[in-house]
Amino acid sequence: MSDAAIIEMARALLDLDVPPDCLSGVRINLALLAEHARLVGDLDE
Amino acid sequence: MAGAIAEAVRSGRRSALSVAEETVARIRARDGAIGAVTRLLEDRALTEARAVDAIVAAGGDPGPLAGVPYGVKDLFDVAGLPTTAGAAMRRNAPPAGADAEAVSRMRAAGAVLVATLNMDEFAYGFATVNAAFGTTHNPHDLDRLAGGSSGGSAAAVASGMLPLTLGSDTNGSIRVPAALCGLYGLKPAHGSLPMGGVFPFVDSFDDIGPFATSIADLKLAWQALGGAGDGADSVRIARLGGWFEANMAPELAAAIDRLDAHLGGLTRVEFPEVDRARSAAFLMTAAEGGARHLPELRRRPLEFDPATRDRLMAGAMLPAPHYLAAQAFRETFRAAVNALFEHYDVLIAPCVGEVAPRIDDPFITVDGARVPARAHLGRLTQPLSFIGLPVIAAPLRRPGTLPLGLQLVGAPGREAALFALAERLEDDGVIGFSSPV
Protein backbone atom coordinates (compact mmCIF):
# COMPACT_ATOMS: atom_id res chain seq x y z
CA MET A 1 0.00 0.00 0.00
CA SER A 2 1.43 3.39 -0.93
CA ASP A 3 1.90 6.19 1.59
CA ALA A 4 -0.78 8.19 -0.20
CA ALA A 5 -3.25 5.30 0.05
CA ILE A 6 -2.58 4.86 3.77
CA ILE A 7 -3.08 8.56 4.42
CA GLU A 8 -6.26 8.66 2.35
CA MET A 9 -7.79 5.55 3.90
CA ALA A 10 -7.05 6.67 7.49
CA ARG A 11 -8.50 10.10 6.82
CA ALA A 12 -11.59 8.91 4.97
CA LEU A 13 -12.57 6.02 7.24
CA LEU A 14 -11.25 7.03 10.64
CA ASP A 15 -10.80 10.81 10.51
CA LEU A 16 -7.21 10.00 11.47
CA ASP A 17 -4.22 11.96 10.21
CA VAL A 18 -1.18 9.68 9.99
CA PRO A 19 1.86 11.90 10.66
CA PRO A 20 4.74 11.45 8.20
CA ASP A 21 6.94 10.05 10.99
CA CYS A 22 4.50 7.16 11.49
CA LEU A 23 4.01 6.14 7.87
CA SER A 24 6.81 3.65 7.62
CA GLY A 25 5.85 1.93 10.90
CA VAL A 26 2.16 1.85 9.99
CA ARG A 27 2.97 0.34 6.60
CA ILE A 28 5.10 -2.40 8.20
CA ASN A 29 2.36 -3.20 10.69
CA LEU A 30 -0.36 -3.24 8.04
CA ALA A 31 1.70 -5.76 6.07
CA LEU A 32 2.04 -7.89 9.21
CA LEU A 33 -1.72 -7.76 9.81
CA ALA A 34 -2.34 -8.71 6.18
CA GLU A 35 -0.14 -11.77 6.65
CA HIS A 36 -2.11 -12.81 9.73
CA ALA A 37 -5.42 -12.09 8.00
CA ARG A 38 -4.45 -14.38 5.12
CA LEU A 39 -3.72 -17.15 7.61
CA VAL A 40 -7.03 -16.72 9.41
CA GLY A 41 -9.00 -16.67 6.16
CA ASP A 42 -12.48 -15.41 5.48
CA LEU A 43 -15.56 -15.68 7.62
CA ASP A 44 -17.11 -18.55 5.67
CA GLU A 45 -13.99 -20.75 5.67
CA MET B 1 8.55 -15.84 51.25
CA ALA B 2 5.21 -14.03 51.29
CA GLY B 3 3.70 -16.81 53.37
CA ALA B 4 6.57 -16.65 55.87
CA ILE B 5 6.22 -12.88 56.23
CA ALA B 6 2.47 -13.18 56.82
CA GLU B 7 2.97 -15.89 59.40
CA ALA B 8 5.56 -13.82 61.27
CA VAL B 9 3.36 -10.71 61.23
CA ARG B 10 0.18 -12.54 62.27
CA SER B 11 1.98 -14.19 65.17
CA GLY B 12 3.46 -10.87 66.30
CA ARG B 13 7.06 -12.00 65.76
CA ARG B 14 7.58 -9.20 63.22
CA SER B 15 5.83 -5.91 62.72
CA ALA B 16 4.35 -5.06 59.34
CA LEU B 17 5.91 -1.61 59.76
CA SER B 18 9.44 -3.02 59.96
CA VAL B 19 8.78 -5.19 56.91
CA ALA B 20 7.52 -2.18 54.96
CA GLU B 21 10.47 -0.01 56.01
CA GLU B 22 12.96 -2.69 54.99
CA THR B 23 11.17 -3.13 51.67
CA VAL B 24 11.30 0.58 50.90
CA ALA B 25 15.02 0.65 51.73
CA ARG B 26 15.66 -2.43 49.57
CA ILE B 27 13.88 -0.89 46.58
CA ARG B 28 15.87 2.34 47.00
CA ALA B 29 19.09 0.33 47.04
CA ARG B 30 18.38 -2.04 44.16
CA ASP B 31 15.99 -0.52 41.66
CA GLY B 32 18.49 1.83 40.07
CA ALA B 33 20.01 -1.10 38.20
CA ILE B 34 16.71 -2.86 37.46
CA GLY B 35 14.23 -0.13 36.52
CA ALA B 36 11.17 -2.02 37.72
CA VAL B 37 9.57 0.62 39.95
CA THR B 38 7.79 3.65 38.52
CA ARG B 39 6.50 5.07 41.83
CA LEU B 40 7.55 4.20 45.36
CA LEU B 41 4.48 4.62 47.59
CA GLU B 42 6.29 4.99 50.91
CA ASP B 43 3.63 6.97 52.79
CA ARG B 44 0.84 4.65 51.76
CA ALA B 45 2.90 1.56 52.58
CA LEU B 46 3.75 2.77 56.08
CA THR B 47 0.13 3.73 56.74
CA GLU B 48 -1.17 0.34 55.60
CA ALA B 49 1.51 -1.46 57.60
CA ARG B 50 0.61 0.44 60.79
CA ALA B 51 -3.05 -0.54 60.26
CA VAL B 52 -2.04 -4.20 60.03
CA ASP B 53 0.02 -3.92 63.21
CA ALA B 54 -2.91 -2.28 64.99
CA ILE B 55 -5.15 -5.25 64.15
CA VAL B 56 -2.54 -7.69 65.48
CA ALA B 57 -2.08 -5.60 68.63
CA ALA B 58 -5.85 -5.71 69.20
CA GLY B 59 -5.84 -9.49 68.96
CA GLY B 60 -7.40 -9.59 65.49
CA ASP B 61 -6.37 -11.37 62.29
CA PRO B 62 -5.27 -9.00 59.51
CA GLY B 63 -5.61 -11.73 56.87
CA PRO B 64 -3.58 -14.36 55.02
CA LEU B 65 -1.24 -11.78 53.48
CA ALA B 66 -0.69 -9.83 56.71
CA GLY B 67 2.07 -7.29 56.21
CA VAL B 68 3.19 -8.76 52.87
CA PRO B 69 4.63 -5.96 50.71
CA TYR B 70 3.59 -6.02 47.06
CA GLY B 71 3.51 -3.88 43.93
CA VAL B 72 1.17 -3.48 40.99
CA LYS B 73 1.72 -3.00 37.30
CA ASP B 74 1.13 0.65 36.50
CA LEU B 75 -2.33 -0.03 35.07
CA PHE B 76 -4.10 -0.81 38.35
CA ASP B 77 -5.95 2.15 39.83
CA VAL B 78 -4.37 3.37 43.06
CA ALA B 79 -6.52 5.95 44.85
CA GLY B 80 -5.11 9.45 44.54
CA LEU B 81 -2.67 8.66 41.71
CA PRO B 82 -2.98 8.89 37.93
CA THR B 83 -3.08 5.44 36.32
CA THR B 84 -0.40 5.86 33.68
CA ALA B 85 -0.73 2.50 31.86
CA GLY B 86 2.92 3.12 31.03
CA ALA B 87 2.07 6.14 28.86
CA ALA B 88 3.76 9.52 29.09
CA MET B 89 0.51 11.16 28.00
CA ARG B 90 -1.19 9.84 31.14
CA ARG B 91 1.36 11.12 33.67
CA ASN B 92 -1.01 13.95 34.49
CA ALA B 93 -4.28 12.07 34.04
CA PRO B 94 -6.90 12.73 36.75
CA PRO B 95 -6.06 10.70 39.87
CA ALA B 96 -8.00 7.50 40.44
CA GLY B 97 -10.90 8.04 42.86
CA ALA B 98 -10.56 4.57 44.37
CA ASP B 99 -8.31 1.53 44.33
CA ALA B 100 -8.82 -1.16 41.71
CA GLU B 101 -10.94 -4.03 43.02
CA ALA B 102 -7.88 -6.29 43.06
CA VAL B 103 -5.95 -3.78 45.18
CA SER B 104 -8.88 -3.55 47.59
CA ARG B 105 -8.92 -7.34 47.91
CA MET B 106 -5.18 -7.47 48.54
CA ARG B 107 -5.58 -4.83 51.24
CA ALA B 108 -8.46 -6.76 52.80
CA ALA B 109 -6.12 -9.77 52.95
CA GLY B 110 -3.56 -7.68 54.85
CA ALA B 111 -1.10 -6.98 52.02
CA VAL B 112 0.75 -3.66 51.93
CA LEU B 113 1.04 -1.76 48.62
CA VAL B 114 4.55 -0.39 48.18
CA ALA B 115 5.07 0.45 44.50
CA THR B 116 3.72 0.79 40.98
CA LEU B 117 5.70 -1.07 38.35
CA ASN B 118 6.93 -0.57 34.80
CA MET B 119 5.32 -1.97 31.65
CA ASP B 120 5.17 -1.59 27.89
CA GLU B 121 3.02 1.39 26.97
CA PHE B 122 -0.67 0.43 27.17
CA ALA B 123 0.47 -3.20 27.69
CA TYR B 124 1.21 -3.60 23.96
CA GLY B 125 4.50 -5.49 23.85
CA PHE B 126 6.54 -8.33 25.34
CA ALA B 127 9.67 -6.31 26.19
CA THR B 128 9.09 -3.59 28.83
CA VAL B 129 11.11 -1.16 26.80
CA ASN B 130 9.28 2.06 27.46
CA ALA B 131 10.21 5.40 25.89
CA ALA B 132 8.92 7.37 28.89
CA PHE B 133 9.62 5.15 31.90
CA GLY B 134 12.73 3.35 30.71
CA THR B 135 13.71 -0.25 30.11
CA THR B 136 13.27 -2.85 32.83
CA HIS B 137 16.36 -5.06 33.12
CA ASN B 138 16.34 -8.77 33.80
CA PRO B 139 17.74 -9.41 37.31
CA HIS B 140 19.43 -12.61 36.07
CA ASP B 141 21.46 -10.61 33.52
CA LEU B 142 21.07 -6.86 33.45
CA ASP B 143 21.92 -6.78 29.74
CA ARG B 144 18.82 -8.81 28.91
CA LEU B 145 15.10 -8.09 28.60
CA ALA B 146 12.82 -8.83 31.54
CA GLY B 147 9.98 -9.56 29.13
CA GLY B 148 6.65 -7.81 29.09
CA SER B 149 4.35 -6.24 29.23
CA SER B 150 4.37 -6.85 33.01
CA GLY B 151 8.18 -6.68 33.09
CA GLY B 152 8.39 -4.43 36.14
CA SER B 153 6.18 -6.81 38.11
CA ALA B 154 8.42 -9.76 37.23
CA ALA B 155 11.75 -8.01 37.76
CA ALA B 156 10.69 -6.61 41.14
CA VAL B 157 10.07 -10.15 42.43
CA ALA B 158 13.04 -11.86 40.74
CA SER B 159 15.42 -9.23 42.15
CA GLY B 160 14.09 -9.78 45.68
CA MET B 161 12.70 -6.26 46.02
CA LEU B 162 9.14 -7.53 46.55
CA PRO B 163 7.81 -11.02 47.38
CA LEU B 164 4.58 -10.57 45.41
CA THR B 165 3.35 -8.41 42.55
CA LEU B 166 0.33 -8.17 40.30
CA GLY B 167 0.39 -7.89 36.53
CA SER B 168 -1.96 -8.31 33.62
CA ASP B 169 -1.95 -10.78 30.76
CA THR B 170 -3.66 -10.26 27.41
CA ASN B 171 -1.51 -12.39 25.11
CA GLY B 172 1.19 -13.55 27.52
CA SER B 173 2.11 -10.44 29.49
CA ILE B 174 2.35 -12.32 32.79
CA ARG B 175 3.66 -15.61 31.41
CA VAL B 176 6.44 -14.22 29.19
CA PRO B 177 8.15 -12.10 31.90
CA ALA B 178 7.63 -14.92 34.41
CA ALA B 179 9.51 -17.27 32.08
CA LEU B 180 12.34 -14.84 31.31
CA CYS B 181 12.78 -13.88 34.98
CA GLY B 182 12.42 -17.43 36.35
CA LEU B 183 9.20 -16.92 38.33
CA TYR B 184 5.80 -18.39 38.86
CA GLY B 185 2.99 -16.40 37.27
CA LEU B 186 -0.71 -17.07 36.99
CA LYS B 187 -2.92 -16.15 34.08
CA PRO B 188 -6.31 -17.18 35.44
CA ALA B 189 -9.29 -18.36 33.41
CA HIS B 190 -10.61 -15.38 31.49
CA GLY B 191 -12.92 -13.24 33.57
CA SER B 192 -12.34 -15.13 36.82
CA LEU B 193 -10.50 -12.36 38.68
CA PRO B 194 -11.77 -8.78 39.08
CA MET B 195 -10.89 -6.30 36.32
CA GLY B 196 -12.56 -3.25 37.94
CA GLY B 197 -10.15 -0.32 37.98
CA VAL B 198 -7.65 -1.99 35.64
CA PHE B 199 -6.76 0.07 32.55
CA PRO B 200 -8.01 -2.06 29.65
CA PHE B 201 -6.20 -3.16 26.53
CA VAL B 202 -8.23 -5.91 24.79
CA ASP B 203 -11.47 -6.81 26.57
CA SER B 204 -11.66 -10.18 24.82
CA PHE B 205 -8.42 -11.38 26.41
CA ASP B 206 -7.43 -9.14 29.38
CA ASP B 207 -6.88 -10.79 32.78
CA ILE B 208 -4.92 -10.01 35.93
CA GLY B 209 -2.76 -12.30 38.02
CA PRO B 210 0.11 -12.57 40.50
CA PHE B 211 3.88 -13.25 40.31
CA ALA B 212 5.70 -15.09 43.09
CA THR B 213 8.80 -17.17 43.86
CA SER B 214 6.91 -20.23 45.14
CA ILE B 215 3.73 -22.00 44.19
CA ALA B 216 2.43 -21.56 47.76
CA ASP B 217 2.82 -17.77 47.50
CA LEU B 218 1.19 -17.75 44.08
CA LYS B 219 -1.77 -19.64 45.50
CA LEU B 220 -2.06 -17.31 48.50
CA ALA B 221 -2.25 -14.30 46.19
CA TRP B 222 -4.70 -16.04 43.83
CA GLN B 223 -7.00 -16.86 46.73
CA ALA B 224 -6.74 -13.33 48.14
CA LEU B 225 -7.80 -12.00 44.74
CA GLY B 226 -10.87 -14.24 44.75
CA GLY B 227 -9.61 -17.39 43.07
CA ALA B 228 -11.25 -20.58 44.22
CA GLY B 229 -11.47 -24.18 43.18
CA ASP B 230 -11.78 -27.66 44.54
CA GLY B 231 -8.73 -29.79 45.24
CA ALA B 232 -7.50 -32.19 42.60
CA ASP B 233 -6.55 -35.68 43.75
CA SER B 234 -5.72 -37.19 40.41
CA VAL B 235 -4.42 -35.09 37.55
CA ARG B 236 -4.36 -36.44 33.99
CA ILE B 237 -1.37 -34.89 32.23
CA ALA B 238 -0.26 -34.69 28.59
CA ARG B 239 2.40 -32.84 26.70
CA LEU B 240 1.60 -30.29 24.00
CA GLY B 241 3.42 -31.03 20.75
CA GLY B 242 3.37 -29.54 17.27
CA TRP B 243 3.53 -25.74 17.27
CA PHE B 244 4.57 -25.71 20.91
CA GLU B 245 7.63 -27.90 20.33
CA ALA B 246 8.97 -26.11 17.29
CA ASN B 247 11.68 -23.48 17.76
CA MET B 248 12.73 -24.60 21.24
CA ALA B 249 16.28 -24.07 22.42
CA PRO B 250 18.02 -27.48 22.81
CA GLU B 251 18.36 -27.12 26.61
CA LEU B 252 14.63 -26.41 26.89
CA ALA B 253 13.71 -29.43 24.76
CA ALA B 254 16.00 -31.60 26.89
CA ALA B 255 14.51 -30.27 30.13
CA ILE B 256 10.97 -31.02 28.95
CA ASP B 257 12.07 -34.51 27.91
CA ARG B 258 13.42 -35.05 31.44
CA LEU B 259 10.17 -33.77 32.92
CA ASP B 260 8.26 -36.14 30.64
CA ALA B 261 10.33 -39.07 31.90
CA HIS B 262 9.95 -37.88 35.50
CA LEU B 263 6.17 -38.07 35.09
CA GLY B 264 6.41 -41.60 33.75
CA GLY B 265 6.13 -40.83 30.03
CA LEU B 266 3.46 -38.47 28.74
CA THR B 267 1.15 -38.72 25.77
CA ARG B 268 1.82 -36.03 23.19
CA VAL B 269 -1.26 -34.16 22.03
CA GLU B 270 -1.70 -31.33 19.56
CA PHE B 271 -4.11 -28.47 19.18
CA PRO B 272 -5.34 -28.09 15.62
CA GLU B 273 -4.42 -24.97 13.64
CA VAL B 274 -2.43 -23.24 16.37
CA ASP B 275 -0.81 -20.92 13.84
CA ARG B 276 -4.25 -19.76 12.78
CA ALA B 277 -5.25 -19.25 16.41
CA ARG B 278 -2.19 -17.13 17.05
CA SER B 279 -2.90 -15.04 13.96
CA ALA B 280 -6.52 -14.60 14.98
CA ALA B 281 -5.42 -13.44 18.45
CA PHE B 282 -3.00 -11.03 16.77
CA LEU B 283 -5.78 -9.54 14.63
CA MET B 284 -8.28 -9.19 17.47
CA THR B 285 -5.64 -7.57 19.66
CA ALA B 286 -4.69 -5.08 16.97
CA ALA B 287 -8.29 -4.22 16.16
CA GLU B 288 -9.56 -3.86 19.73
CA GLY B 289 -6.44 -2.04 20.89
CA GLY B 290 -6.52 0.29 17.90
CA ALA B 291 -10.20 1.06 18.36
CA ARG B 292 -9.71 1.78 22.07
CA HIS B 293 -6.95 4.30 21.46
CA LEU B 294 -8.35 5.88 18.29
CA PRO B 295 -9.54 9.11 20.00
CA GLU B 296 -6.03 9.83 21.35
CA LEU B 297 -4.39 8.70 18.11
CA ARG B 298 -6.45 11.40 16.42
CA ARG B 299 -5.73 14.05 19.03
CA ARG B 300 -2.07 13.57 19.91
CA PRO B 301 -0.36 10.78 17.97
CA LEU B 302 3.13 12.06 18.62
CA GLU B 303 2.70 11.69 22.39
CA PHE B 304 2.51 7.87 22.08
CA ASP B 305 5.55 5.65 22.39
CA PRO B 306 6.48 5.14 18.72
CA ALA B 307 6.77 1.40 19.37
CA THR B 308 3.07 1.14 20.23
CA ARG B 309 1.63 4.02 18.18
CA ASP B 310 2.31 2.55 14.75
CA ARG B 311 0.90 -0.84 15.78
CA LEU B 312 -2.24 0.78 17.22
CA MET B 313 -2.76 2.92 14.12
CA ALA B 314 -2.48 -0.10 11.85
CA GLY B 315 -4.85 -2.02 14.12
CA ALA B 316 -7.45 0.74 13.95
CA MET B 317 -7.34 0.43 10.15
CA LEU B 318 -8.00 -3.33 10.11
CA PRO B 319 -11.17 -4.04 8.06
CA ALA B 320 -14.04 -5.50 10.10
CA PRO B 321 -14.33 -8.75 8.08
CA HIS B 322 -10.88 -9.79 9.33
CA TYR B 323 -11.86 -9.13 12.95
CA LEU B 324 -15.10 -11.06 12.54
CA ALA B 325 -13.32 -13.99 10.88
CA ALA B 326 -10.86 -14.13 13.78
CA GLN B 327 -13.72 -14.07 16.28
CA ALA B 328 -15.56 -16.84 14.46
CA PHE B 329 -12.45 -19.01 14.33
CA ARG B 330 -12.05 -18.59 18.07
CA GLU B 331 -15.20 -20.61 18.69
CA THR B 332 -14.04 -23.39 16.35
CA PHE B 333 -10.67 -23.51 18.08
CA ARG B 334 -12.22 -23.43 21.55
CA ALA B 335 -14.45 -26.42 20.75
CA ALA B 336 -11.51 -28.46 19.46
CA VAL B 337 -9.37 -27.69 22.51
CA ASN B 338 -12.21 -28.35 24.97
CA ALA B 339 -12.59 -31.80 23.42
CA LEU B 340 -8.99 -32.55 24.44
CA PHE B 341 -9.71 -31.50 28.00
CA GLU B 342 -12.27 -34.30 28.25
CA HIS B 343 -9.25 -36.61 28.43
CA TYR B 344 -6.68 -34.46 30.26
CA ASP B 345 -6.64 -32.00 33.15
CA VAL B 346 -3.27 -30.32 32.50
CA LEU B 347 -1.24 -29.90 29.33
CA ILE B 348 2.46 -29.03 29.57
CA ALA B 349 4.10 -26.68 27.07
CA PRO B 350 7.10 -24.37 26.97
CA CYS B 351 6.41 -20.72 27.78
CA VAL B 352 9.08 -18.99 25.70
CA GLY B 353 11.30 -21.00 23.38
CA GLU B 354 14.61 -19.56 24.52
CA VAL B 355 16.28 -17.50 27.25
CA ALA B 356 15.77 -13.75 27.56
CA PRO B 357 17.04 -11.82 24.50
CA ARG B 358 19.71 -9.20 24.95
CA ILE B 359 18.45 -5.62 25.23
CA ASP B 360 20.87 -4.50 22.51
CA ASP B 361 19.75 -7.34 20.21
CA PRO B 362 16.00 -7.71 20.90
CA PHE B 363 15.23 -10.52 18.48
CA ILE B 364 14.27 -14.19 18.70
CA THR B 365 14.64 -16.91 16.10
CA VAL B 366 11.49 -18.44 14.61
CA ASP B 367 11.71 -20.94 11.76
CA GLY B 368 15.25 -19.77 11.07
CA ALA B 369 14.32 -16.08 10.81
CA ARG B 370 15.16 -13.35 13.30
CA VAL B 371 11.96 -11.56 14.37
CA PRO B 372 11.42 -8.71 16.87
CA ALA B 373 11.07 -9.93 20.45
CA ARG B 374 8.60 -7.17 21.28
CA ALA B 375 5.92 -8.68 19.03
CA HIS B 376 6.88 -12.36 18.95
CA LEU B 377 7.95 -13.46 22.44
CA GLY B 378 4.33 -14.46 23.04
CA ARG B 379 3.96 -16.88 20.17
CA LEU B 380 3.54 -19.81 22.59
CA THR B 381 1.32 -17.97 25.06
CA GLN B 382 -0.99 -16.15 22.65
CA PRO B 383 -2.95 -19.19 21.35
CA LEU B 384 -3.89 -20.14 24.93
CA SER B 385 -5.21 -16.79 26.16
CA PHE B 386 -7.04 -16.57 22.81
CA ILE B 387 -9.59 -18.98 24.31
CA GLY B 388 -9.25 -17.85 27.92
CA LEU B 389 -7.54 -20.93 29.36
CA PRO B 390 -5.98 -20.71 32.84
CA VAL B 391 -2.21 -21.16 32.82
CA ILE B 392 0.49 -21.29 35.48
CA ALA B 393 3.88 -20.20 34.21
CA ALA B 394 6.48 -22.18 36.14
CA PRO B 395 10.29 -21.87 36.15
CA LEU B 396 12.34 -24.96 35.36
CA ARG B 397 14.77 -25.45 38.23
CA ARG B 398 18.18 -24.59 36.77
CA PRO B 399 20.26 -22.68 39.34
CA GLY B 400 23.09 -20.59 37.97
CA THR B 401 21.71 -20.42 34.43
CA LEU B 402 19.37 -18.07 32.62
CA PRO B 403 15.73 -18.99 33.30
CA LEU B 404 13.50 -21.09 31.06
CA GLY B 405 9.84 -21.63 31.83
CA LEU B 406 6.90 -23.93 31.30
CA GLN B 407 3.20 -23.38 30.88
CA LEU B 408 0.86 -25.67 32.80
CA VAL B 409 -2.38 -25.27 30.89
CA GLY B 410 -5.80 -26.20 32.25
CA ALA B 411 -9.43 -26.16 31.24
CA PRO B 412 -11.42 -23.14 32.44
CA GLY B 413 -12.30 -23.48 36.09
CA ARG B 414 -9.65 -26.14 36.69
CA GLU B 415 -6.96 -23.98 38.29
CA ALA B 416 -6.93 -26.41 41.22
CA ALA B 417 -5.47 -29.11 38.95
CA LEU B 418 -2.76 -26.68 37.83
CA PHE B 419 -1.81 -25.88 41.41
CA ALA B 420 -1.82 -29.58 42.34
CA LEU B 421 0.62 -30.47 39.55
CA ALA B 422 2.82 -27.43 40.21
CA GLU B 423 3.03 -28.29 43.91
CA ARG B 424 4.10 -31.83 43.06
CA LEU B 425 6.74 -30.71 40.56
CA GLU B 426 8.10 -28.13 42.99
CA ASP B 427 8.29 -30.74 45.75
CA ASP B 428 10.17 -33.02 43.33
CA GLY B 429 12.69 -30.25 42.54
CA VAL B 430 11.77 -30.13 38.85
CA ILE B 431 10.48 -26.56 38.94
CA GLY B 432 11.40 -23.77 41.30
CA PHE B 433 12.75 -20.26 41.58
CA SER B 434 16.51 -19.76 41.63
CA SER B 435 17.88 -16.43 42.84
CA PRO B 436 19.96 -14.46 40.36
CA VAL B 437 23.67 -15.06 40.86
Image: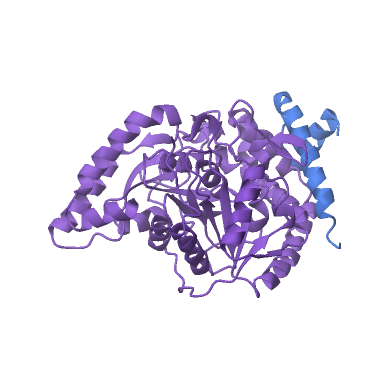
**Left or right: residue B337 compared with residue A38:** left
**Residue ID at (71%, 43%):** B315
State whether residue B155 is above or below residue B389.
above
Residue B219 position within the rendered picture, expressed as x and y whole percent measured from the top left: 42, 60
Colouring style: by chain
Judging from the image, what is the letter of the chain drawn in blue? A
**Left or right: residue B196 compared with residue B122:** left
State whether residue B339 is above or below residue B140.
below
**Residue ID at (56%, 39%):** B147
Label total for image: 0
The quarter of the picture where residue B241 lies is: bottom right
| Farthest left residue in view | B58
Residue B254 position within the rendered picture, expressed as x and y whole percent measured from the top left: 63, 49
Q: Quadrant of the C terminus of chain B?
A: top left
State whether residue A26 is above or below residue B72.
above
Q: Could one spot residue B84 in this view of the protein?
A: no
Residue B344 position within the rendered picture, expressed as x and y whole percent measured from the top left: 63, 71
Residue B366 position within the rendered picture, expressed as x and y whole percent measured from the top left: 74, 41
**Left or right: residue A7 compared with residue B282:** right
**Residue ID at (50%, 41%):** B181
**Residue ID at (61%, 34%):** B357
The hue in which chain B appears in the rendered picture of the protein: purple
